[in-house]
Image: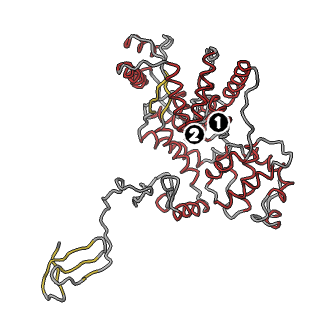
Amino acid sequence: MSDAYCTDCKKETELVVDHSAGDTLCSECGLVLESHSIDETSEWRTFANESSNADPNRVGGPTNPLLADSALTTVIAKTNGSSGDFLSNSLGRWQNRNGNPERGLMQAFKTIATMSDRFMSCCVFICGITLLSLVIYLVVGVGVGVGVGVELGLVGTIKDRANEIFKRLEDQKSTRGRNQDALLAACLYISCRQEDKPRTIKEICSVANGATKKEMGRAKDFIVKTLGLETGHSVEMGAIHAGDFMPDSCLAVCFICGYVWCGITLSTNITKRMFLFDLFIERLGLVGTIKDRANEIFKRLEDQKSTRGRNQDALLAACLYISCRQEDKPRTIKEICSVANGATKKEMGRAKDFIVKTLGLETGHSVEMGAIHAGDFMKRFCSNLGMSHQAVRAAEEAVKKSEEFDIRRSPISIAAVVIYIITQLSDDKKPLKDIAIATGVAEGTIRNSYKDLYPHLQKIAPSWYAKEEDLKNLSSP
């Protein structure tokens, strides 16, 4: 309360401020002396404890010096849960239709933050080959070979430096046509080295979305060379010592010893398999029946002693791929590899062929995995691009019509090119680069598939969605 002069009371009286209505009232006569006043103080109240699917917090994030227009833009967040507010979802779609030149940078910074906070699958094997392994063996006194989940645990300064490195590459237009996941992983690796918190290439690859060690190594060399040409001197990354990795490795050993201390007797292979399957399922958003089937497939391989000496990550990823196919919830090989700890598409393809052959010899007949159709991926790809309901419906209808023609392309490529066609026919046109990222199909593959599909456009595109004039306005391949 504060004192002020009241025109009705003709004297100094105490004032009452109603913050909810923005009114200032006289405490004696109730006269509204000031209305709709603006509260310029900070909003300290938090809404986190209120039970609601929507996030009512109205405080934006801090400005980012690497983004020129970060303080002038607004991001409309999606509501939590499947049944979101119609208005906020519509506003989000409308906002996505407006081109933002810094959208690529924002997505890259978000990916770096996700990789930094992601859990990695860490396997500590005491074999005496390396100095670090030998030291841990001598201290602990036991051989350890259990797969556990350890957080990468990178501090904010490392993320900021990785963002800065990627921004410098973007400013030189050096990222076009290159593997974005490998570049982001390499930026994170270099920033860890420069901040004296090194991580191994395998650790970074385990949280990178499918980027292999070879791809990341090439990306690292490219970044060092590019930044060296920019500044005129070589990029300093700091020396690596065995002691730099000691706390993380000992943490993994302590984590394992904690299980033993609690009196839980765990089988090494079963523990690793269950943990990795849970990790893969969570990252891909799959149902429990797929996990159960993948466990069953791997168990059949173990019963035949067929998993020894083979890449375990590739085998687990292949089991998950086969189970998704058998449960009519297919995922692309690239999607599976993005969560499989460093397993490449080639390794996973070999593991898949090995599993099919092994199980076929066991049962005496070929393993049924079910056919893949382009429509199986359509809803997920369209959701990744934030397409409208009408555009998704048109894309699904176009994909079904495309199956009537002999188009010798993979279902994933057909789904990608159909999405490209539908978006070009709508007001919400999506860049080819965004479609390639959302579908995991290379831009060149989409262009070549567009050439094959172009002669059939009038029969494939729904008549209710696009007129003949709109089809003629599409660019010819």
Colour scheme of the picture: secondary structure
Q: Where's residue 407, x and y in %?
A: 84, 45
**Other residues around mark 1 within 10 Å, as few (<14) / some (14–19) / many (≥20):** many
Answer with the quarter of the image where residue 215 lies.
top right
Q: Which mark is residue 324?
A: 1
* Residue 461 visible from this viewpoint: yes
Q: Nearer the viewer, residue 346 or 194?
A: 346
Q: Nearer the viewer, residue 445 or 121?
A: 121
Per the model, the C-alpha gap separating discs 2 and 1 is 9 Å
Q: Which residue is pictured at 81% across the width and 62% down the height?
A: 471
Q: Where's residue 414, x and y in %?
A: 76, 47
The reply to whether dot 2 and dot 1 touch (C-beta < 8 Å) is yes
Q: Nearer the viewer, residue 204 or 235?
A: 204
Q: Is residue 417 left or right of residue 379?
A: right
* Residue 333 visible from this viewpoint: no
Q: Where's residue 236, x and y in %?
A: 50, 33
Q: Is residue 92 left or right of residue 117?
A: right
Q: Quadrant of the N terminus?
A: bottom left
Q: Secondary structure at mark 2?
A: loop
Q: Is residue 138 left or right of residue 330?
A: left
Looking at the picture, does residue 354 appear above or below residue 1?
A: above
Looking at the picture, does residue 278 appear above or below residue 457?
A: above
Q: Secondary structure at mark 1?
A: helix
How many numbered dots are placed on residues in this image?
A: 2
Q: Which mark is residue 379?
A: none
Q: Of marks 2 and 1, which one's residue comes earlier in the chain? A: 2
**Other residues around mark 2 within 10 Å, as few (<14) / some (14–19) / many (≥20):** some
Kind of residue at badge 2 = Leu
In the picture of the structure, the residue carrying the numbered disc 2 is 286
Q: Where's residue 97, x and y in %?
A: 62, 61
Kind of residue at badge 1 = Cys
